[in-house]
Amino acid sequence: MAQKIVAGNWKMNLESDEAFQLIDELNTELEESDVRVIVFPPSLYVLPLSKMNKGSYEVGVQNFYTAESGAYTGEIAIDQIKSVGGSIGLIGHSERREYFNETNAFLKEKVDVAIEKDFDFIFCCGEPLEIRESGKQADFVKLQLEESLFHLNAKQMEDVIIAYEPIWAIGTGVTATAEQAEMMHKDIRSWVADKFGQETADKVTILYGGSCKPGNAEELFSCANIDGGLIGGASLKSTDFSAIIKAF
Ligand code: PGA
């Protein structure tokens, strides 16, 4: 079965005192539940946040590099992340694709390294506005999956977490309607089923991201193929983030 996940992508926000305060609040507000809760702070804070963890969330990284170690100024490796308590990484967020030129081919390398290192990841995909307006969003997202994920075998694929994040809905306040999101999620699951079989497709977790907030989370999460959310802006306020988790 797919996992239920709510993940908060803090992006390049919060100074350390604000980050620690947010985590203190989450430690108080989060209740025991069957939802897997993950926070993705700036990597600087992974170590202190792991130490402050009372067990109700996991700490992940927004980015990592493919090499094991060595002369790669500014980058961080999976073993280093694990050594400070990070358990999962984002791969292919649209902001990494756009501002740091991460291509489907490079993201495939990250997927391979993560699997080799037994490091969980959330693979992000999603189309820009002009592609949505031309009606070619399904082809666009399918190609992202084919070029970065579909070389895996079924056993590897079943543990993959995908986040569908239409770029036009990220940080804009414009959410994809539950119907638009569900249509893409259903397509994603059917492409996985065509390639790897239905049993694998049923185990793949597919999250929605893009202006998800307390007011729309319940409707989104009640869709058959939406297994949770990757939350940006609303993950920076503990009350909003906890409300989204409770929306399950
Ligand atoms: P948003 O961001 O919730 O602020 O739209 C989502 C994301 O980029 O992961």
Image (spheres, rainbow, N blue to C red):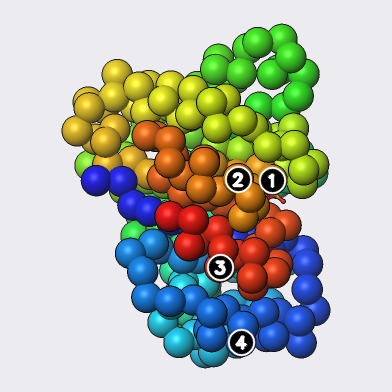
Please provide percent x and percent y for residue 117: 37, 60
* Among the two numbered marks 1 and 3 on one chain, the one whose residue lies closer to the N terminus: 1
Frontmost residue, 108 versus 22: 22
Earlier residue among tags 2 and 1: 1
Circle 1: element type:
loop
Identify the residue position indicated by label 1 in the image. 211
> Can you identify the residue that label 3 sits on?
242
Residue 24: give its label: 4
The quadrant the C terminus occupies is: bottom left
Which is more foreground, mark 4 or mark 2? 2
Q: Is disc 1 in contact with disc 4, using a CB cutoff of under 8 Å?
A: no
Name the residue type under label 3.
Ser
Vertical placement of 39 versus 164: above or below?
below
* Residue shown at the point (43%, 35%) measured from the top left: 223
- Mark 2 in CB contact with mark 1 (< 8 angstroms): yes
Label 2's element? Answer: helix
Question: Residue at coordinates 38% horizontally, 53% vertically from top-left?
Answer: 4
Q: Which residue is mark 2?
A: 216
Left or right position of 82 against 90: left
Mark drawn on residue 128: none
Given contact means CB atoms under 8 Å apart, are the residues at marks 2 and 3 in contact?
A: no
Q: Residues within 10 Å of mark 2 (few under 14, many from 20)?
A: some
Q: Within 8 Å: ligand 1 and the Cβ of disc 4? A: no
Establish whether ligand 1 lies closer than 8 Å to the Cβ of label 1.
Answer: yes
Q: Is residue 165 left or right of residue 118?
A: right
Between discs 4 and 3, the one toward the N terminus: 4
Disc 3 element: helix
